[in-house]
Amino acid sequence: MAYIKEVSPDDYQTLAFFCAHFNNETRSETFWLNRYKLWWEENPALSPDFKRGWIILEENKILGFLGSIPRYFMIGGKPEVSFN
């Protein structure tokens, strides 16, 4: 049975393999690891309680991934966090 798991830094390597081997994907695992670093680890909009995204798994095999990337957005001259 499939289940959903929150993305943690411990998942990056497995997730990078999944993304690099997705249909018609030409970018490497290294590309994806660097992307996660940019999206989450070096992102000043990320707060400790923020969820990076979710992985859909079945028998520990990734079936899908939904990433959530924070960014600052100016609203009324004040920076607010929005999510992509």
Image (cartoon, grey):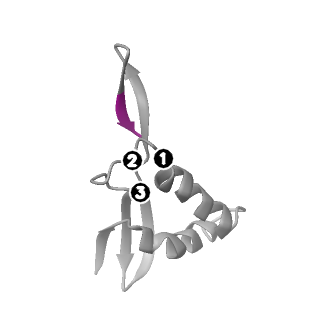
**What span is colored magenta in the figure?**
80-84
Residue 24, position in %: x, y? Answer: 68, 62
**Dot 2: within a 10 Å radius of its alpha carbon, few (fewer than 14), some, or many (20 or more) residues?**
some
| Residue at left offset 70%, top offset 62% | 27
Judge whether 81 appears above or below 50 on screen: above
| Residue at left offset 39%, top offset 47% | 46
Closer to the camera, 30 or 22? 30
Decide which of tag 1 and tag 3 comes sooner along the chain: 1
Task: Single out the mark in the foreground, 1 or 3.
Answer: 1
Report the residue marked by disc 2.
46
Q: Residue furthest right?
A: 26
Residue 43, label in figure: 1
Q: Is residue 6 left or right of residue 67?
A: left
Q: Is residue 9 left or right of residue 28?
A: left
The disc labelled 1 sits on which kind of residue?
Answer: Asn
Residue 59 placement: quadrant = bottom left
